Image (cartoon, helix red, strand yellow):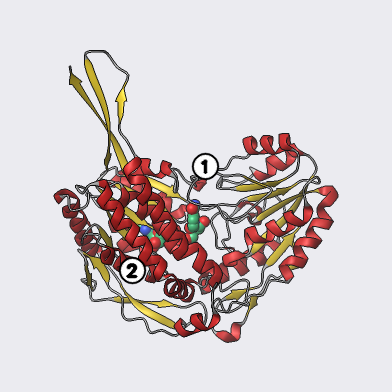
Amino acid sequence: MLDQDAIDALRHQLIPEQRNLIDGRKVAATTGETRATISPIDGGILANLAESAADDVARAVASARTAYTDGRWSGRAPIERKQVMLEWANLIEKNALELAVLGARENGTEIRMAFNAEPMNAANTIRYYAEALDKIYGEIAPTAPDVLGLIHREPVGVVGAIVPWNFPLMIGTWKLAPALAVGNSVVLKPSESASLTLLRIGELALEAGLPPGVLNIVTGGGAVAGEALAMSMDVEVLTFTGSGAVGRRLLEYSARSNLKRIYLELGGKSANVIFPDADLNAAAGGTIGAIFPNSGQVCVAASRLLVQRDIFDEVLEKVTAGTQSLIVGDPLSLVNSTGAVHGPAQLQKNLNAVQDAVAAGAEVVTGGHALHGESGGTYMAPTILKGASTQSDLFRDEIFGPVLSVHSFDTEEEALHLANGTVYGLAGAVWTKDLSRAHRMIRGMHTGMVQVNRAAPVDVTSPLGGVKQSGNGYDKSLHAVDKFTNLKTAWLKI
Ligand code: NAD
């Protein structure tokens, strides 16, 4: 149970100047430059981060390479790696409240979600891969009788990871935990506007016994530090979560450098499809829970609601009433349902998207405006729009804010056509009691994930990955191990 007094005791904790984590030491950027990280709660400066240059990234990669080559981690018995990772998870859990408050101050996520989806989720993810790492076997090929064909699974070497600001610990550990579990060394570049919690769990990793140099964290801008990592000739695999625009660049960097494998987890424009036979109260509640948490800044957020025409008004009424009962405000207050939008740029993007949609013919059902401007922070009213064209930007493009676009359909075929009517293919949800229809929709939706009669958080046991322009590869589950391992075959004459 989260306790308001305990949260308040941490809310003004001073944060010292932050440094990169290279070779197990905290080091300033070679440039001596720093960058302020701003809190969306009140617009105040939270801390200064090292503004790394290409040289800093090169040092981090060199450290990771040395650590990998001398076997201080890659050469340890799996059971030993497992013990370190389990201890790391324990330390994260012990420090969960401190991490959650730090994260909420940095990215504005409401504290309950900042606690459960971030440190608690990160600890679970690390435990999952720690427990898995000594259960991953090689194979013997069923080949000719006079040879033995062995298939080894080996770490790739040095992994680069670049992550976004919306859930740094959750998404960060989706990369770090499987990559480290199988013996790789990693260089992580967090988002320039959400680095603090990842730097902190980097310290906890050392405390847990992860040898220096196995996990290096370099902060700074995407265009310099991120590009340097993606262009490195000594990084074998780059795993990325973020926007499609940056994802495209990473593919170019790979082509222009060492052809490193690039795994992309990109944006989405997920559809929530409600049929008349569904439990409409559950569907309305699920709709709200699928778009407005973390101010809509969730990659799988169901930002399009598709409702069969006969029940359109009834569903919209229920969803609107539920939305209007949400309380937006200080993310560190337990009474608020939703916290702050990540920063002024994202808030402006959200407001522009609403304005453009209205100019193109959409109607605001509720919200559509900023809130609490006097606080200096960035808050937005949960927003519902109806009547937008299905050819509009509102219907097709990711906003990454608390904005829901509602549309009607007549037939199942039309629902499917609309659901698939974007370049994205990350997730979707279907509400129906008809099992056959549910299965037809699961098969028909061009997404990496479909939920039926729920649109709720999912855990580490199943893969998360996009199709179409939502990405390639999978985070989570044992499938994620494929990204961070190579298969080597050996043929022995018997
Ligand atoms: P972003 O693409 O702007 O930034 C992501 C990371 O890339 C940051 O660390 C940034 O510094 C870095 N970067 C920026 N330019 C770079 C460059 N030229 N070279 C190398 N690195 C560079 O994304 P964001 O605004 O931080 O996050 C929001 C986006 O992330 C949304 O599109 C959202 O849908 C997506 N996202 C996807 C998932 C998923 O699992 N599919 C999860 C969360 C967020």
| Residue 163 position (above or below residue 109) | above
In the image, 234: left or right of 118?
Answer: left
Q: Quadrant of residue 202?
A: bottom left
Does the residue tagged 2 have its C-beta within 8 Å of any atom of ligand 1? no
Does the residue tagged 1 have its C-beta within 8 Å of any atom of ligand 1? no
User: Which residue does the numbered mark 1 point to in the structure image?
Assistant: 467
Place of residue 98 in the rendered image (x, y in percent of width and height, measured from the top left): 42, 75
Say whether residue 206 is visible: yes
- Label 2 sits on what residue type? Leu
Q: Quadrant of the N terminus?
A: bottom right
In the image, 438: left or right of 190?
Answer: right
Nearer-the-camera pick, 164 or 436: 436
Place of residue 467 in the rendered image (x, y in percent of width and height, measured from the top left): 52, 42
Nearer-the-camera pick, 365 or 314: 314
User: Which residue does the numbered mark 2 point to in the structure image?
Assistant: 199
Residue at x 73%, y 54% (from the top left corner): 283
- Label 1 sits on what residue type? Val
Q: Secondary structure at mark 2?
A: helix
